[in-house]
Amino acid sequence: HGRTGKGVGLASAARRLYPDVMDQHGAIVVLTGAGISAESGIATFRGPGGLWEGHRVEDVCTPQALTADPALVHRFYDGRRAALPDVRPNPAHESLARLDRAWPGDVLIVTQNVDDLHERAGTRRLLHMHGALTSALCAACGARAPHAGPLPPGSRCDACGAAALRPDIVFFGEYPYEMERIEAALAACDLFVSIGTSGAVYPAAGFVALAAAYGARTLELNLEPSAGSDRFDETRLGPASRLVPEWVD
Ligand code: BV8
Ligand code: ZN
């Protein structure tokens, strides 16, 4: 490449990183977690201030909690959805959007996050494996539809009419979205990069081992060592808003 001015930066950065892997426009899979949105002002889960009304995400983000106390669970997600207009993408989201636009090979950004900061930065090859605050799921017919504003328990589904809308969030014990597509991308990628995740939650925490088993090079960009750091070829410690632009550009 080098056809577009932008391409030169990416190409030289990639060659500097993994010359053997990236010359032939290698395929890249990026996994992001709450750490990439921390500098945009969205609290992470397992750091200081990671609790919400004294609850751990593991206690609020389950089908049992939704059945036992729907108002609490809906309130948890309504509060996080309402905060979206007050935050904006940071340089880490913006440089991943540049990578998505400028890299000539395959790129897939898989996020565990439910905020819309990757979309708002312009990333298109994006997949929310744990769902999204900006959509609602019908517990009766499975329809998913964009949703803004509060989502009170008993909200009605436009597709089937049932009063069964719930936050479109993958709870603990529920199957993450698009696992087949993710596994295929991991099997085919030349480089796997993990950004801002503690490696505490599966199956996302197992992606590095899967990518490495298929021969990909693996890189971790995180503020502090994670549960999976020793599985990566390389770990760089620091804030995502500095490390991600340095890696991409
Ligand atoms: C499933 C919903 C079956 C949305 C979430 C025992 C062993 C293995 C697995 C299990 C087990 N017991 C139970 C399980 C299964 C369970 C699980 O893994 N539990 C954990 C707690 C042990 N997993 C599930 O139930 C999943 N489903 O397994 O189904 C299956 C089996 C096989 C294959 C397919 C299906 C469903 C998991 C999804 C649950 N939903 N969220 C929401 O409310 O947000 S998980 C929740 O945690 C969020 O999605 C979040 O993304 C995710 C992971 O957290 P992180 O993103 O990593 O955030 P965290 O705060 O932990 O860390 C932030 C990191 O950023 C830190 O490292 C920090 O250092 C760093 N950081 C901070 N600031 C910065 C920074 N980095 C850079 N710059 C900064 N400025
Ligand atoms: Zn429905």
Image (cartoon, rainbow, N blue to C red):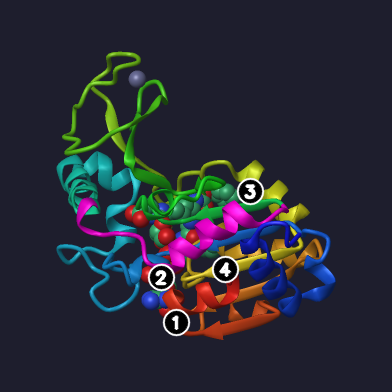
Which residue position holds label 4?
194
Residues at discs 1 and 3 in contact (Cβ within 8 Å):
no
User: Spatial distance from mark 1 to mark 3, Cα to Cα?
Assistant: 25 Å
Which label's residue is closer to the chain start, 1 or 3? 3
Name the residue type under label 3: Ile
Closer to the chain start, of discs 1 and 4, is 4
* Residue 50 placement: quadrant: bottom left
Residue 222, horizontal then vertical, whole percent? 49, 78
Give the alpha-carbon distance from disc 1 to disc 4, as whole Å.
Answer: 12 Å
Assign a secondary structure to mark 1.
loop
Q: Circle 2 — which element?
A: helix
Element assignment for label 3: helix
Separation of residues labelled 2 and 1 (CA atoms): 8 Å
**Is the C terminus in the top left, top right, bottom left or bottom right quadrant?**
bottom right
Residue under numbered circle 2: 35
**Magenta portion: prevailing SS class:** helix
Q: What residue sits right under mark 3 in the picture?
A: 182
Question: Marks 4 and 3, how far apart in space?
Answer: 14 Å
- Any atom of ligand 1 within 8 Å of the CB at mark 1? yes
Query: Does 102 lie within the magenta span?
Result: yes
Region rendered in magenta:
85-105
